[in-house]
Amino acid sequence: METERLYIRRYTKEDFPGFCELIRDKMASPYAKYDHTFPTEDAALMEVLNFFAISDEFWALEEKSEHKIIGFVSLNYVDEASRNLGYCLHTHWHGKGYASEAARRIIRYAREELGLEKLVTGTAEENLPSVRLLERLGFTRLCEGSFELHFH
């Protein structure tokens, strides 16, 4: 997949240096305590990268002009009609519209190519940029930190 500034593609082993930088940055974030914990050691990160590379649920976000891994998006299986949307961006790329750009494209993929009925997601209430992004994308708040988007 592609957007104006991003390639949204499967991970490869060549992405290892950028992937390590991304995950280490993620785990140093003040929001890391609310999310899935990732390892930060090289050997364990290589295992995670290998899993991401063979999974049909995770995509690398590669910034086109710099050919740099700046994040990932995921559509994790919930059931036949729905997936859980996830996203992570290196802090250097926050506030520049990349998360919105990637999420809009993956939402279109979920609706048009996968034929899903809805997406669900969650974020910490304290993560105001993520909460605002989900609201801008049309997600409805179900309860604290839990959101869904229905396709009609």
Image (tube, rainbow, N blue to C red):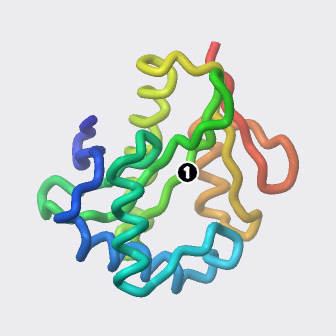
Query: In the visual, does 119 lie left or right of 17?
Result: right
> Residue at the spot x=36%, y=64% of the render?
49
Residue 69, horizontal then vertical, whole percent:
26, 63
Query: In the visual, does 113 lie left or right of 111?
Result: left
Query: In the visual, does 147 lie left or right of 80?
Result: right
> From what the image shows, is residue 96 above or below residue 80?
below
> From what the image shows, is residue 103 above or below residue 61?
above
Q: Quadrant of residue 145?
A: bottom right
Q: Quadrant of residue 106?
A: top left
Q: If the image is split into quadrants, where does the N terminus sit?
A: top left
> Residue at the spot x=44%, y=17% of the render?
112
Judging by the rendered image, the residue that carries numbered circle 1 is 86
**What amino acid does circle 1 point to?**
Gly
Under circle 1, the secondary element is strand
Q: Nearer the viewer, residue 137 or 143?
A: 143
Q: In which quarter of the image is residue 17?
A: bottom left
Q: Nearer the viewer, residue 39 or 63?
A: 39
Residue 73, horizontal then vertical, whole percent:
44, 50
Residue 109, horizontal then vertical, whole percent:
42, 27
Q: How crowded is mark 1: few (under 14 residues within 10 Å), some or many (20 or more)?
A: some
Count of numbered tags: 1
> Residue at the spot x=41%, y=19% of the render?
113
> From what the image shows, is residue 45 above or below residue 60?
below
Q: If the image is split into quadrants, where does the C terminus sit?
A: top right
Residue 101, horizontal then vertical, whole percent:
38, 44
> Residue at the spot x=46%, y=43% of the render?
57
